[in-house]
Image: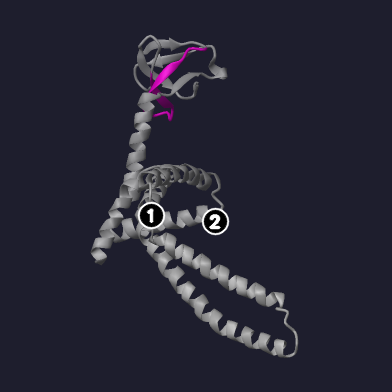
Amino acid sequence: METIIQQLFWLWVPLALLPIWLRIAIFTFIVIILLRPVLFQLAPRLIELVSNLLHKAVHYLSYPVMVLFHRFLTRRRTQGNYQIPSWIEGIEELFALLLKAFSKAELLSKKRTRNKARWKKTFRLVGFAFAILLPLAIVNNPTSSYSKTWDSFDKWLTEEKVQKDLGFDIKGYQGTLLAKIEEASAKVNPKEYTLTKQYKSGGNIRSTPSLNGKIVADLVADETVTSLDEESTDDRGIKWLKIETETGEIGWISAKIVEEK
């Protein structure tokens, strides 16, 4: 049984690789959807049971109380006082109200749920609402109690259950995944560079990452070059960036004379 439960923690692995806001959203939506059959099946039975127990408890409690009230009123009548105190009427009305309420709750719990399709749709809408609002609340309020509770829960699942018990290096996979995402993002949205104010007079683009490299093009003020996501440092400690000009020339330029646009 313990092994089966441990295997369920593998379901957390794909969620742990997602950004925290998306992880919270998916987890919240799944929990709310899983609660739906519990509320439809178990909640009515639980309400029926509790209502029945409370109804009997109030009934058995009211009996000795009414006997005491009867004796008290009998003594008053023998003394010639036929007026019923308001506090006795209030307690009697309270018992009657409780008995009626518990009977009504027990009766409603036995009725079949109508419009199940509408309730399912309502649950989905509630799930979507919480999946949007809860991540926003947790991410934007990191010092709040609910954010700290989520952080503790996330840490317990990730470090204790997945990494320690299952032996899965989730942090290593997270690092690899983030690196691939950044690499893909760099290809889709490459960095662009232009000359710094200090070197507005122009700069050289060389064939190799070195001052000895052949000049293949010139970079003039306000001209933009695109990064090819490759860097190199020569023997003089100068950092070079591999770039492509607007005309398609490929070469290396010193990182000292350019800045990201």
- The span picked out in magenta is 222-243
In the figure, is residue 51 to the left or right of 6? right
- Disc 1 residue crowd, few under 14, some 14–19, many 20+, Cα 10 Å: few
Tell me the chief SS of the magenta region: strand
Instruction: Indicate the colouring scheme.
Output: one colour
Q: Nearer the viewer, residue 65 or 124?
A: 65
Amino acid carrying mark 1 in the image: Leu
Q: From the image, tell me which residue sits under label 2.
A: 145
Q: Is residue 169 visible?
A: no
* Residue drawn at point x = 48 percent, y = 12 percent: 223
Question: Badge 2, how many Cα within 10 Å: few under 14, some, many 20+?
Answer: few
Q: Nearer the viewer, residue 156 or 214?
A: 156
Q: Give the x, y percent position of residue 232.
A: 37, 28
At 36% from the left edge and 61% from the top edge, which residue is drawn?
Answer: 42
In this picture, is 195 found above or below 31? Answer: above
Residue labelled with disc 1: 35
Q: Kindly state the secondary structure of the residue where label 1 is placed.
A: helix
The percent coordinates of residue 162 (x first, y second) are 32, 56
Q: Secondary structure at mark 2?
A: helix
Q: Is residue 238 magenta?
A: yes
Q: Position of residue 27 (x, y in %)?
A: 39, 49
On the rendered structure, is 137 left or right of 122?
A: right
- Say which quarter of the image contains residue 161: bottom left
